[in-house]
Image (spheres, helix red, strand yellow):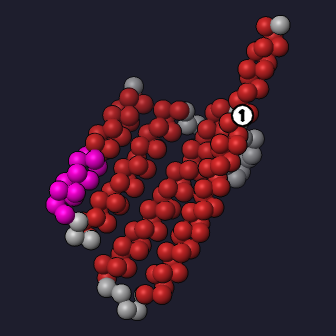
Amino acid sequence: MQHSLERFLLATRWTMLPLYLALFAVVVALYVMVGREIWHLFAVLLDAKDTEIVLLVLSILDLVLVANLLVMVALSSYETSISPLDIEGDKPDWLGRIDSSGIKVKIAISVVMISAIHLLRAFMTNTPAGELLALAVVEVVFVAVAGGLKFVARH
């Protein structure tokens, strides 16, 4: 009886697979969003101000960073929670070597980068000083958390 229960409990890890697949579905949605931004970029390229072009590029960069984050989380979570990926040659270097604390650090650094892009975008669009200050405080908190996670992961 106990052995059957343990096998069942271990098999429930596969219930996470649809959630990881959902992350990949969101990446497909991000492709559409990046395509929309690129379309808009080329539509206004000749008539737009430099700041408009930079803001569009920052939007694309932001979406790419989010997509990277989703793929990284889905792959590493699948490998640590469900089953090791048995693919030689095509496997990213970090996969298989990264543990949960390492993935948390990578996620935190990605969040810091995404937040920095939002702060820069707000600065470039003449956002009110109070809102800029709030965004800057949030960025500092994200940097502190990422640094703290990196410190903890090393020790």
> Horizontal placement of 52 versus 132: left or right?
right
The reply to whether residue 95 is visible in this rendering is no
For the point 65% across and 44% down, which residue is it?
A: 20
What percent of the width, then of the height, locates residue 117? 35, 61
| Quarter of the image where one finds residue 75 | top right
Q: Residues within 10 Å of mark 1 (few under 14, many from 20)?
A: few
**Residue 33 magenta-highlighted:** no
Residue lying farthest bottom? 46
What percent of the width, then of the height, locates residue 118? 34, 60
* Residue type beneath disc 1: Thr
What percent of the width, then of the height, locates residue 119? 29, 59
| Quarter of the image where one finds residue 127 | bottom left
For the point 35% across and 75% down, which residue is it?
A: 54
Query: Quarter of the image containing the N terminus?
Result: top right
For the point 76% across and 15% down, which residue is it?
A: 6
> Horizontal placement of 125 versus 57: left or right?
left
The reply to whether residue 130 is visible in this rendering is yes
- Range drawn in magenta: 128-140
SS for dot 1: helix
What percent of the width, then of the height, locates residue 130? 17, 56
**Residue 134 magenta-highlighted:** yes
Q: Nearer the viewer, residue 20 or 97?
A: 20
Q: Main secondary structure of the magenta part?
A: helix
For the point 43% across and 87% down, which residue is it?
A: 44
Residue lying farthest left? 129
- Residue 74 lies, with reference to residue 114, above or below; the image says above
Residue that mark 1 sits on: 15
